[in-house]
Image: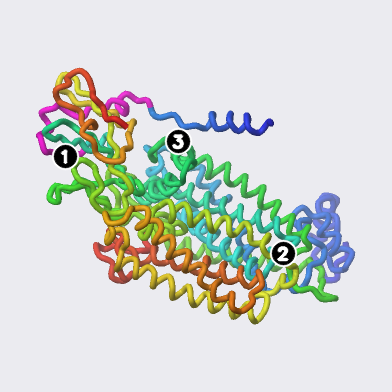
C-alpha cells in the first residue's frame, strides 16, 4: 500500500501486515479503479452503486429523509435491544421494571429516552419522506412498486410505534391503546376478530401485553427489515433517486455518499441525544382499568382520528377515513403513469401554484369545519329527529367528502392533468391530517372539549405524555 | 390451494383464549342485602356496576360503548358519565347523551343463597334495555340471565 505522507513505523507495521491486508484488501480509494472496487468488495458499501447522479445528492432535493428514517430505525433496534435486558412484559411487572431501569440502571433513563424520541422521529421522518417522494413525482414508472413497498413500511412503522406504546403499562399507555383498539372494533365484519386477535381477548389485559410485545420486538421489526431491504434494493434497480437527468451528471459514489451518510448519522445522533438528555420519556401512574384519565388521548399519530371522532360515527371517521387514505396512497402511481415530471419538486410552476392554493384552502377549511361542527353539532341538535346514521354518518361524512373534493371541482375549470389532480388531492389529505392531529393534540383538554393550549383547565398540559 | 388451509391453521393457533380463572368467571359481588333497591354499586374487580331496581338486578359493564373508556356512575346526576367524549347512560345503561352508539353491555348474574355472582368475562351486547335483562330476586338458585 502506497502512502504519500510520512508515517510512523507503528502505523506501517500494522497496515502492511498480512493480517491487516487480509481484512482490507485494497488501499485507500483515491483513483477510479479503487473507488469502483471499494463499492463491490465492501459489505457495507456494496449496497451503493459505483456512480450516482450528482443531482440526487443535493440536500434540498431529498433532504436525506429516507436515510434518516433508516438511521432512526437502526437506533431503535439498538436501544430496543438494550431495553430488553431490563423490561418485563407482564402487567404486574412491566411498570416497575421501567421504574427500576430509570432509577437504578446507569444510563437506563437515557436509553429509554433515546428509544422514545427516536420512535417519534421515525414516524415523522417516514411521513415527510413519503411527502417528498410524492411531491417530486418519484413514484412514477418504473418506481410504482417501490412506492407501494414504502406505504407498507409506513403502516409497519405505525404498528411498531403503537405496539410499543402499550409496554410501559402506565395510565397513558393503557388507555391510549384501549381507545385505539376500540377504533378498530367498529370496522364491519373484520373489526371484532381483528381487535380480539390483537388484544388476545375483548379487553386490554395480560394477553394484550404479550401479543403487543411479540409484535413489537420480533414480528414487526423482521417485517420492516425485509421490506426495507427490498425497498433499498429497488432504489438501485430503478436507477437511483428519481432526478431530471442530463449528460455528465454521474460522479463516483465514494467518498461523497459515505460522507453524507456519516454526516446524517452524526446529525441524527446529536439531535436525539440532545433530546434524550433534555427531556425524559413520560411515565404516568401505573395502569388502573377502573380509572380513565381526563382527557384520554390516543398516541399523537392517531389523535387526528380521535379528533375526527368528535364529529362523526366511528365507522366513518375511524374506519372510512384511514381506509380511504391508505387506498388513495396505494393507487397514486397507477393513476399517474406519465413518466415526465419525475424528479422535480411540484413538477412545474403550475404544480407549485396548485399545491400552494390547495394548502391554503385546506388550512382555512379544516378549522372552519371544526368550529361549525362544535358550535352546531348535528348529533345533539338533531337527536331523535332524524336517524342516527344521518346525523352521525351522512352529514359529517358528506361535509368531509365535499371539503376533499372541492379543490378538484375548482381545478376542473383549468384543464388539469392527472398529476395536477393528484397534487391537489394529496395536499388536501396531507394538510388536513396535520391540522386534525394538531387540534386533537394541542386544543383538546379535559372532557375532550376545545380550549386554547395555554389555557387548559385542571392543570392539564397538552404535551405531557407525548 | 395451500394458502387457505395454512391461513386457517395460523388463525386457529393465534385465536385468543378467554381467561378461565374462577374469580373472573364467577365474581362474588356481595350479599343481596348489600345492594339496596335504587342503588348503583361499583364492583371494581369486575369492572362493572351492579344496579338494583324494584324488579331485579342488572350488572352493567363499565366499558363505554363508544371507545372503551371507563364510564363512572355519578350519584348526584344519577347517570353514568364517560370522561372521554361525554357519553351519558341512565341507571339501566341506555344512552341519554354523547356519541355512544349503543347501551352499556350487561353481564350474567347468578344468585345463590342470597349471594350475588357476576360472570364478568361474558358481556352481552344489546340494542336497548329490556325488562327480561333483569335478574329477578325471586329466583334463588337459578339465574334468569339477560337475553342477547
Vertically, is A423 above or below A284? below
Labels 3, 2: one chain? yes
Q: Report the side of A425 relative to A200 (left or right).
A: right
Q: Name the residue under label 3.
A: A200
Magenta residues? B20-42
Q: What element carries label 2?
A: loop
The question of residue A183 being in magenta is answered with no
- Measured in 3D between alpha carbons, the distance from the residue under mark 3 to the one under mark 2, in whole angstroms, is 43 Å
Q: Residues within 10 Å of mark 2 (few under 14, many from 20)?
A: some
- Measured in 3D between alpha carbons, the distance from the residue under mark 2 to the one under mark 1, in whole angstroms, is 63 Å
Frontmost of labels 3 and 1 is: 1
Kindly indicate whether the residue at mark 1 contacts the one at mark 2 (C-beta within 8 angstroms).
no
Q: Report the side of A284 relative to A27 (left or right).
A: left
The question of residue B35 being in magenta is answered with yes
Percent position of residue A140, x then y: 71, 64
Tell me, for residue A337, which label it has, or none: 2
Amino acid at each position: 500500500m502506497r502512502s504519500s505522507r510520512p508515517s510512523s513505523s507503528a502505523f506501517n507495521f500494522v497496515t502492511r501486515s498480512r493480517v491487516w491486508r487480509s481484512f482490507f484488501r485494497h488501499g485507500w480509494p483515491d483513483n477510479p479503479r479503487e473507488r469502483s472496487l471499494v463499492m463491490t468488495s465492501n459489505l457495507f458499501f456494496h449496497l451503493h452503486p459505483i456512480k450516482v447522479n450528482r443531482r440526487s445528492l443535493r440536500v434540498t432535493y431529498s433532504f436525506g429523509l429516507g436515510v434518516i428514517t433508516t438511521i432512526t430505525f437502526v437506533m431503535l433496534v439498538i436501544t430496543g435491544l438494550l431495553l430488553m435486558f431490563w423490561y418485563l412484559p407482564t402487567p404486574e411487572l412491566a411498570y416497575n421494571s421501567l421504574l427500576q431501569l430509570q432509577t437504578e440502571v446507569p444510563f437506563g433513563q437515557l436509553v429509554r429516552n433515546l428509544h422514545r424520541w427516536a420512535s417519534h422521529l421515525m414516524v415523522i421522518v417516514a411521513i415527510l419522506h413519503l411527502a417528498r417522494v410524492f411531491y417530486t413525482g418519484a413514484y412514477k414508472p418504473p418506481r410504482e412498486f417501490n412506492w407501494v413497498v414504502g406505504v407498507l413500511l409506513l403502516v409497519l412503522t405505525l404498528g411498531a410505534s403503537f405496539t410499543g406504546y402499550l409496554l410501559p403499562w402506565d395510565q397513558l399507555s393503557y388507555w391510549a391503546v384501549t381507545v385505539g383498539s376500540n377504533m378498530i372494533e367498529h370496522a364491519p365484519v373484520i373489526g371484532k376478530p381483528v381487535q380480539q386477535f390483537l388484544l388476545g381477548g375483548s379487553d386490554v389485559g395480560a394477553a394484550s401485553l404479550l401479543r403487543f410485545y411479540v409484535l413489537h420486538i420480533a414480528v414487526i421489526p423482521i417485517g420492516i427489515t425485509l421490506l426495507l431491504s427490498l425497498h433499498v434494493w429497488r432504489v438501485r434497480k430503478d436507477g437511483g433517486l428519481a432526478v431530471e437527468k442530463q449528460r455528465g451528471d454521474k460522479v463516483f459514489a465514494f467518498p461523497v455518499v459515505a460522507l453524507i451518510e456519516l454526516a446524517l448519522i452524526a446529525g441524527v445522533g446529536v439531535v436525539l441525544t440532545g433530546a434524550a438528555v433534555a427531556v425524559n420519556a413520560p411515565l404516568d401512574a401505573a395502569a388502573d382499568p377502573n380509572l380513565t384519565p381526563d382527557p384520554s388521548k390516543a398516541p399523537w399519530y392517531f389523535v387526528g382520528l380521535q379528533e375526527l371522532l368528535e364529529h362523526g360515527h366511528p365507522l366513518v371517521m375511524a374506519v372510512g377515513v384511514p381506509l380511504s387514505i391508505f387506498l388513495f396512497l396505494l393507487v397514486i402511481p397507477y393513476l399517474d403513469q406519465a413518466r415526465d415530471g419525475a424528479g422535480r419538486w411540484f413538477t412545474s410552476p403550475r404544480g407549485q401554484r396548485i399545491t400552494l392554493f390547495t394548502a391554503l384552502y385546506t388550512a382555512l377549511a379544516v378549522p372552519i369545519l371544526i368550529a361549525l361542527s362544535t358550535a352546531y353539532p348535528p348529533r345533539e341538535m338533531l337527536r331523535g329527529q332524524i336517524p342516527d346514521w344521518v346525523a352521525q354518518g351522512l352529514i359529517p361524512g358528506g361535509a368531509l367528502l365535499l371539503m376533499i373534493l372541492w379543490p378538484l371541482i375548482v381545478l376542473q375549470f383549468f384543464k388539469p392533468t392527472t398529476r395536477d389532480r393528484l397534487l391537489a388531492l394529496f395536499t388536501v389529505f396531507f394538510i388536513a391530517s396535520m391540522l386534525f392531529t394538531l387540534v386533537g393534540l394541542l386544543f383538546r383538554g379535559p372532557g375532550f372539549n376545545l380550549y386554547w393550549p395555554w389555557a387548559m383547565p385542571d392543570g392539564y398540559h397538552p404535551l405531557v405524555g407525548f | 390451494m395451500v394458502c387457505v388451509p395454512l391461513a386457517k391453521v395460523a388463525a386457529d393457533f393465534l385465536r385468543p383464549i378467554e381467561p378461565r380463572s374462577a374469580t373472573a368467571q364467577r365474581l362474588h359481588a356481595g350479599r343481596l342485602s348489600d345492594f339496596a333497591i335504587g342503588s348503583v354499586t361499583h364492583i371494581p374487580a369486575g369492572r362493572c356496576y351492579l344496579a338494583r331496581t324494584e324488579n331485579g338486578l342488572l350488572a352493567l359493564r363499565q366499558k363505554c360503548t363508544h371507545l372503551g373508556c371507563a364510564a363512572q356512575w355519578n350519584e348526584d346526576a344519577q347517570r353514568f358519565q364517560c370522561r372521554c367524549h361525554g357519553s351519558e347512560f341512565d341507571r339501566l345503561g341506555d344512552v341519554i347523551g354523547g356519541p355512544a352508539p349503543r347501551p352499556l353491555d350487561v353481564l350474567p348474574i347468578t344468585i345463590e343463597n342470597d349471594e350475588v355472582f357476576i360472570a364478568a368475562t361474558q358481556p352481552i351486547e344489546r340494542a336497548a334495555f329490556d325488562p327480561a335483562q333483569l335478574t329477578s330476586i325471586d329466583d334463588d338458585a337459578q339465574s334468569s340471565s339477560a337475553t342477547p
